[in-house]
Structures are given as C-alpha cells and as structure tokens.
Amino acid sequence: QWYQRRVRGKMSDLPDGWVQRMSKTHGKEYYYNTETQESTWEKPTGGSQNKVRASHLLVKHRDSRRPSSWRESNITRSKDEALEILQGFIQKIERGASFAELAQENSDCSSASRGGDLGFFGRGQMQKPFEEATFALKVGEMSGPVDTDSGVHIILRTA
C-alpha cells in the first residue's frame, strides 16, 4: 500500500506489518514483521500485495512424495481414501467446525501445530497447484480438494 506510517516519531515507508528494531546482540537495526514474526537485515519492499496468507489441512496418502508425518510414520491409505477423509472434514467445516482445530488434530503437515497456518507466501514458494488454488481464493474462502505431490489439501485463505 502507498500510505506512510509513523514509526518512533518519524515517517516510515515500510510495508504493512513491518517495524524497524535495534538488535541488542549486533547493535544494528533490523526489520521485523509483527504479523508473520519474520525478521531480516534487508529493508522489506513491496508489502504483502503480492503475497497471500493461508491455512491448510493436508491428508497424505501412500503415493505422496513423503508418505509419513508427525501423526503416522508410514501412511498406507490410498489417494481415494485420503480424498474421502478430506471430504469429511469439508462437511464438518461447512456445519460449523473450526478449520484450525480440525487442522491441528488431523493435518499431516507440521503446520498442524499452528492450526494449519502457513503464514504469508508469494508466487513460486509453494507447489504450483497449491499456489494457484490459494491465489484464486478470496480472503475467508475455502477451497475444495487440491491435489499436490504432498497429498490432498483443503486451503483457507486468511489474507
């Protein structure tokens, strides 16, 4: 976004969510994103207009590129079984269940510990089908099943 904000009494042209801080260890300024908890020495540019934020619930199957997860060391279900499980989650969410709670309890991704939250990401950072589905969603909208090399997902765009 184009507008400027005040940071410590002076105008700042940092993108939304970014603040400038002083490193006690290194004695120099760095940049910190209060939304994603990302930090960098390089001044961020461009803001989040080219990024999205999403949560997902992943169900892996035996043909996933890595058929194991924090939940199961050896995943043996078929892709059709994974899709059936995912459809059950979609129905629960449509009836009012919490996406974050279902992801936390059932996702085969380590993001489960954050309710499926993947934070902000831009184009080229995720597998193509996942990226395309996420960028096509409106904020607050949930996808149907999305198939990637990792397994099958449902995606909730959050920003």
Image (cartoon, rainbow, N blue to C red):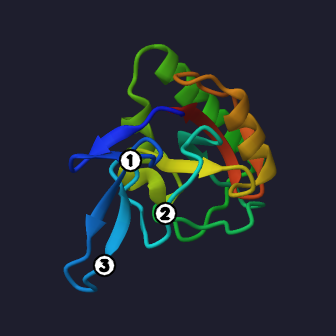
Q: Give neighbour class at mark 1: few <14, some 14-19, many 20+ (Cα, 10 Å).
A: some
Is residue 80 visible to us here?
A: no
For label 1, the residue is 12
Mark closer to the chain start, 1 or 3: 1
Residue drawn at (53%, 48%) of the image: 120
Disc 3 marks which amino acid?
A: Lys
Nearer the viewer's eye, disc 1 or disc 2? 1
Front residue of 136/35: it is 35
Indicate the amino acid at tag 2. Lys
Kindly identify the residue that appears in the image at 54 percent across and 40 percent down. 54
Distance CA(mark 3)–CA(mark 2):
13 Å
Left or right, 17 with reference to 157? left
- Spot occupied by residue 104 in the image (x, y as percentages of width and height): 39, 46
- Per the rendering, the mark at residue 28 is 3
Residues at marks 1 and 3 touching, judged by CB atoms closer than 8 Å = no
Q: Which residue is mark 2?
A: 43
